[in-house]
Image (spheres, rainbow, N blue to C red):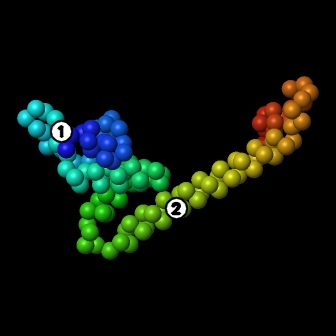
Amino acid sequence: MKIGELAQKADVNIDTVRYYERQGLLPEPQRLRSGYRQYEVEDVSRLRFVRRAKALGFTLQEIRDLLELSSHQEKDMAGMKSAAMEKLADVEAKLAELTRIRDGLKMLVASCPGHCALEQCPILSALAEDPT
């Protein structure tokens, strides 16, 4: 199949197919005499895998690692679970950090009446405060 059909079936755009190909996430396709790329049916599944992994927050390098793990179907799934657990721990750490940031911002917003002179603004004072 040609690149447009592959992109449509995998629900990505053509530039994404080319990008993932350059990044080594898709194997180099064969070329027709006309120069057009000729993709295989398996490439649709691979692109969907990449797209879903990306949506779950995996980096391109992590996706490469997952693809490498998935290419050894005869092996145990422990490596795949370990990779997913690492990503989950990373996401939970980011959520904790975002929660801390949200709570700090809520406190700043609640402390500000939203009127009066800017020099009396508690948000500005808190941001300018020297922590030492």
Report the Cα–Cα distance between label 2 and label 1: 37 Å
**Residue 65 in sight in this render:** no
Image position, residue 94 (x, y; %): 59, 53
Q: Nearer the viewer, mark 2 or mark 1?
A: 1
| Quarter of the image with the N terminus in it | top left
Residue 80 in the image, given as x and y percentages of width and height: 38, 66
Mark 1 residue type: Arg
The image quadrant of residue 20 is top left
In front here: 38 or 21? Answer: 38
Residue that carries the numbered disc 2 in the rendered image: 88
Badges 2 and 1: C-beta atoms under 8 Å apart?
Answer: no
Q: Kindly identify the residue that appears in the image at 65 percent across and 50 percent down.
A: 98
In the image, residue 40 above or below residue 118: below
> Residue at coordinates 81% horizontally, 40% vertically from top-left?
109
Badge 2: few (under 14), some or many (20 or more) residues near its Cα, within 10 Å? Answer: some
Q: Nearer the viewer, residue 114 or 46?
A: 46
Residue highlighted by disc 1:
37
Q: How many marks?
A: 2
Whether residue 102 is visible: yes
- Report helix, strand or loop for mark 2: helix
Find residue 82 and report its image quarter. bottom left
Is 50 above or below relative to 17?
below
